[in-house]
């Protein structure tokens, strides 16, 4: 499944029609990953204590995350490891969902505002983003950059 997602992402990015100059390093710098080991370590602890019971110990999510629960009509927890849709959302939206819970009652995500600090949320996001393949992170960084320019 990961291979299909990565290949699909690669085809998507290739279809964007951008020509890249192999001597231009601005893209690599612009999409530099967060490699703050201390922040990632803190995020792993926060995730383990608060999120793993639903999203899985490695952020793998529920295997049926795309299928609504027949009783509640809500979606199970998605993977946060780069194989689902979390990377489609800019940082502000990721933080909003963590703070306020699932939008429109679509899922069972509780609101963590008042329970987790802003730093806890940032650390948790850094931890699960560290699991994303480079191509997924680059696509997210582009989405995040566009959103921050609005």
Image (cartoon, helix red, strand yellow):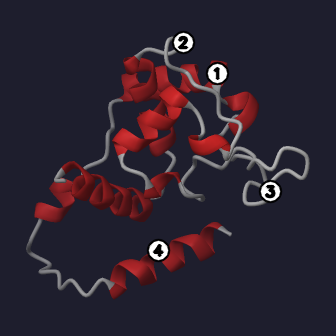
Instruction: Measure the C-alpha gap from mark 1 to mark 4.
Output: 30 Å
Does residue 34 lie above or below 117 as drawn? below
Does residue 142 lie above or below 53 as drawn? below
Q: Is residue 94 left or right of residue 46?
A: left
For marks 1 and 4, the one nearer the N-term is 4
> Residue 59 falls in which quadrant of the image?
top right
Is residue 29 visible in the rendered image? The answer is yes
Question: Answer yes or no: do the residues labelled 2 and 1 have beta carbons within 8 Å?
Answer: yes
Does residue 126 lie above or below 83 as drawn? above
Question: Answer yes or no: do the residues labelled 4 and 3 have beta carbons within 8 Å?
Answer: no
In the image, 84 versus 21, the foreground residue is: 84
For marks 2 and 4, the one nearer the N-term is 4
- Helix, strand or loop under label 4: helix
Q: Which residue in the rendered view is the most extreme toward the right?
A: 71
Disc 3 target residue: 64
Q: Position of residue 15 (x, y in %)?
A: 35, 87
Disc 4 target residue: 9
Query: Marks 4 and 3: which is nearer the front?
Result: 3
């Amino acid at each position: 499944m990961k291979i299909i997602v990565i290949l699909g992402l690669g085809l998507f990015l290739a279809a964007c029609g951008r020509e890249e100059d192999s001597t231009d390093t601005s893209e690599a710098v612009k999409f530099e990953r967060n490699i703050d080991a201390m922040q990632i370590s803190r995020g792993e602890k926060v995730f383990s204590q608060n999120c793993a019971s639903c999203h899985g110990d490695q952020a793998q999510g529920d295997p049926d995350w795309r299928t609504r629960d027949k009783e509640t009509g809500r979606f199970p927890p998605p993977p946060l490891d780069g194989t689902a849709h979390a990377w489609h959302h800019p940082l502000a939206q990721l933080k909003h969902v963590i703070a306020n819970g699932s939008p429109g009652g679509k899922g069972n995500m509780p609101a963590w505002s008042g329970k987790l600090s802003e730093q806890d949320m940032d650390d948790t996001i850094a931890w699960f983003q560290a699991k994303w393949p480079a191509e997924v992170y680059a696509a997210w960084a582009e989405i995040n950059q566009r959103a921050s320019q609005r």
